[in-house]
Image (spheres, grey):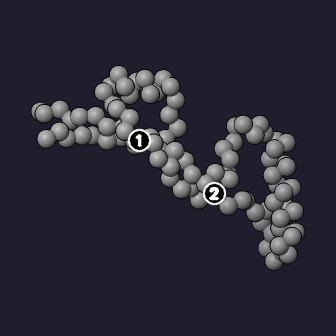
Amino acid sequence: MATWSYLVTENIDGPQLDKLGEDGWELVGVTSEPVTPASPERSGTAFPMPRSLGRLEEAADKLTKLGASDAAEEPSVDATSRLLWVFRRPLSDD
């Protein structure tokens, strides 16, 4: 009976796929895993704030971040899942 070694990874690109193939890994599936979005950072207000004002503050924080950095550099905090790549290769009979 064949025995297998499994590898699960994420964020894989073409050259990495080629390298895994050269090393004997075979892609057996791609699945998604739920991700809990990170909660937005708060400004540190110690007083309770009406919900609408809190949303305005969050919007202002997002605009500040967009103006300060390139949006392509930061991953989206709205992601609800990520892809997982599942590989296998036979174990040696040693």
**Front-most of residues 76 and 40:** 76
The percent position of residue 91, horizontal first and vertical second, equals 21, 35
The percent position of residue 6, horizontal first and vertical second, equals 31, 41
Residue holding disc 1: 29
**Front-most of residues 57 and 27:** 27
In the visual, does 9 lie left or right of 71? left
Q: Measured along the vertical axis of the image, is residue 45 above or below residue 15?
A: below
Residue 9 visible? The answer is no
Quadrant where the N terminus is found in the figure: top left
How many numbered markers are drawn?
2
Q: CA distance from mark 1 to mark 2?
A: 25 Å
Q: Residues within 10 Å of mark 1 (few under 14, many from 20)?
A: few
Residue holding disc 2: 37
Which is nearer the N-term, disc 1 or disc 2? Answer: 1
Find out whether the residues at labels 1 and 2 contact each other: C-beta distance under 8 Å.
no
The percent position of residue 28, horizontal first and vertical second, equals 37, 39
Look at 50% across and 49% down and name the residue there: 32
Give the quarter of the image for residue 37: bottom right
Q: Measured along the vertical axis of the image, is residue 26 above or below residue 53?
A: above
Task: Kindly identify the amino acid type of the residue bearing the numbered disc 2.
Answer: Pro
